[in-house]
Image (tube, rainbow, N blue to C red):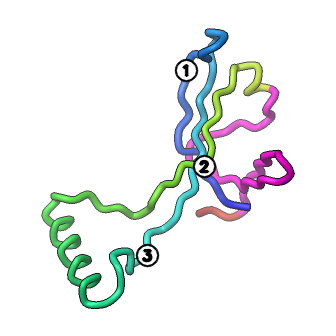
Amino acid sequence: MVQVRVYRISSVTEPTTGLPAKQIELVEVKQRGAQGYGAGDEGRMVQNMVNQLQSMGLVPQIREMVFPKVTMVLTESEYDLFGLRLDVNDVYDLEIRNGSLSLKKSTEGI
């Protein structure tokens, strides 16, 4: 089981039928650790250089890394049958078992 966050919901046209649809992107979010540049003196040196560039506004600060997990394209009727009203930034527990995907509203946030 993994926690996923609704990253984006877009209105699209379903390619095969031409019907209005929703494209829903679910991502796994992991916090970037302080040792993301390696251990030892080299890692600290790179971390210091990146921090200086970020303080000057030349490199954006990255607080989280986003890993795509599932992208769904559902027609309006399929979305109604789906039974969940997804909103951006909602967090769900994603379970993949025996060829099926299960989404359940998470009780703890990321």
Q: Amino acid at mark 2?
A: Lys
Residue 10 in the image, given as x and y percentages of width and height: 53, 28
Crowd around label 2: few <14 · some 14–19 · many ≥20 (10 Å): some
From mark 1 to mark 3, how far is it between C-alphas? Answer: 36 Å
Disc 3 + disc 2, Cβ < 8 Å: no
For this orientation, the residue located farthest to the right is 98
Q: Which comes sooner in the sequence, label 1 or label 2? A: 1
In the picture, the disc for residue 33 is 3
Quarter-of-image position of residue 32: bottom left
Task: Answer left or right for 80 relative to 72.
Answer: right
Residue 7 highlighted magenta (yes or no): no
Which residues, given as a range, are shown in magenta? 81-107
The N terminus: image quadrant: bottom right
**Viewer-side residue, 67 vs 4:** 67
Circle 2 residue:
69
Crowd around label 3: few <14 · some 14–19 · many ≥20 (10 Å): few
Q: Amino acid at mark 3?
A: Gly
For this orientation, the residue located farthest to the left is 56
Quarter-of-image position of residue 78: top right
Tell me if residue 98 comes above or below residue 84 in the rendering. below
Quarter-of-image position of residue 64: bottom left
The number of callouts visible is 3
Dot 3: what SS?
A: loop
The C terminus: image quadrant: bottom right
Residue 23 in the image, given as x and y percentages of width and height: 59, 30
Task: Answer left or right for 47 relative to 98.
Answer: left
Q: Which comes sooner in the sequence, label 3 or label 2? A: 3
Residue 69 in the image, given as x and y percentages of width and height: 60, 49
Q: Which comes sooner in the sequence, label 1 or label 3? A: 1
In the picture, the disc for residue 12 is 1
